[in-house]
Image (tube, rainbow, N blue to C red):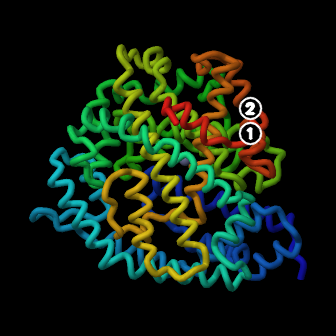
Amino acid sequence: MAIDLTSYRREAEEFLTAIDREYYLHFSGRQDDFEIEPIYDRHAGLFSREAVDGLREASAPAALVEFATQGHIGRETKSQSAELARCEAALEVDWDGERIPFRSAAVVQANEPDPDRRAQLDAARNELTESALNPLLRELLDTSHALTSELGWPSNVAMCEELSGIDLRALEAQTSAFLAATDESYEQVVEPQLRRQIGLGFGELRRSDLPAFFRAPSLDPGFPQERLVPVLRETLGSMGIDVDAQPGVTIDTESRPKKSPRAFCAPVRVPDEVYLVIAPVGGRDDFAALFHEAGHTEHYAHVDAALPFEDRYLGDNSVTEGFAFLFEHLVSNPEWLSRRLGVEDPSAIVEHSRASKLVFLRRYAAKLAYELDLHAGEPLEGLDQVYARRLSQALHVDWPTSSWLADVDDFFYAARYLRAWALETHTRAALCERFGPSWFEDPQAGAFLQELWRRGQGAEGGEGILAAVGGTELDFQVLREDLGVAA
Ligand SMILES: [Zn+2]
């Protein structure tokens, strides 16, 4: 029976609205329950084998087929994912006589000042990952690969390339060229910042030290709690966006005991009901997270309501992540830091951000290359070694094999982030060229962004945005130049 695209779209939108509403209510601390199972049950037909095949036969837009396919694989692996979550939630790390929940160990490690204690905790986490989580992760991976081939694709790579429209191997060629071009300057850029923040050079650096380096608590005093939400309102206001007058946007800053400590955006109805949720604590990380989520929020809240469902909610997430990065980048922009937060000497913040970004870009480039190996449809023997080798080479530090299954983004989300970083750099360059280095205080720049946001992330995706900002191809050399790294 032929699938009715109109009713499929309507039901898919109802489903996402229900899921995102439940997510918002639970993680904002307004509701204890998190009842997503009944929502999946009510809309089970969206993710059936028949729906996936029907959409493909009807030559439905790729974003709809992608939604159905990912949902299908998610549904078929639901009990395995639940088992993994239960196991992870119950795990405790034994660390120097202390027992701490596995899930909070990463945060504890980032805040631990003693490098040896960080290394001990990292080793204990790796051991648990290998003994308790890897067997479950391996089962989950095998099942999802089997489902991919049942659906008729030779590999997960082939499926993701077809459904996302992203040439993953061409992207990997570009990001590997970025790795090669930045390899020689990498330590020169990063080492002074490592020394400044954690007192270590590459000679002594261990993988377990990196989270403490990113955390950089010495930079927090420039980012006081009481300025967090006001500075977002002011920044948007000077771009000509009065966030309190936006009917579709709710900024939820109320404090509740069970509110998520991390800011998030819940696009419940796009563009008419979008929540930006924050439990304001302050510190640089908190500002960066709030601005990142504000980028998502403004993007979704400006999407043209007349666009089809898939162009409002689905499609190329490089677009929404690109706008999130654009806002997040303000928090390390020297002009913004001095004008909005009165930071007298922003250089420490700017230099730390530049070094961290180079580490992140190189890490994601290595991850993309590895994930292409992992999902190539070939046997998985030896891939733990491939993972460790690629990450070690990219980051110039010994990288353990233990997270070869845990450190994997579903359906090549790493590719979306990499494209988003490139898109953000192109967009920011266009804003600076047209409106000057203080573009974030120009209502015309705000109007320019609003026009881009209206497009959603449909058929043209990231390439459409790129063309609108005057670019021709997503180029990773602009990232290298933007970071001021010599080739
Ligand atoms: Zn994001």
The residue lying at 65 percent from left, 40 percent from top is 423
Tell me if 386 is positioned left or right of 39 in this view: left
Residue placed under numbered mark 2 in the picture: 469
Residue in the foreground of this view, choosing between 23 and 62:
62
Inspect the image, locate mark 1, and give the three-letter code of the amino acid beneath it: Ile
Q: Position of residue 479 (x, y in %)?
A: 57, 37
What secondary structure is found at the residue carrying circle 1? helix
The residue lying at 34 percent from left, 33 percent from top is 283
The residue lying at 40 percent from left, 15 percent from top is 342
Asked if residue 172 is positioned above or below residue 443 in the image, the reply reads below
Residue placed under numbered mark 1 in the picture: 465
Asked if residue 60 is positioned above or below residue 182 in the image, the reply reads below
Asked if residue 41 is positioned above or below residue 337 in the image, the reply reads below
Quadrant of the image occupied by residue 84: bottom left
Q: Position of residue 82 (x, y in %)?
A: 46, 76
Q: Position of residue 255 (x, y in %)?
A: 39, 41
Tell me if 182 is positioned left or right of 123 in this view: right
Residue extending farthest to the left is 97
Residue in the foreground of this view, choosing between 418 and 223:
418
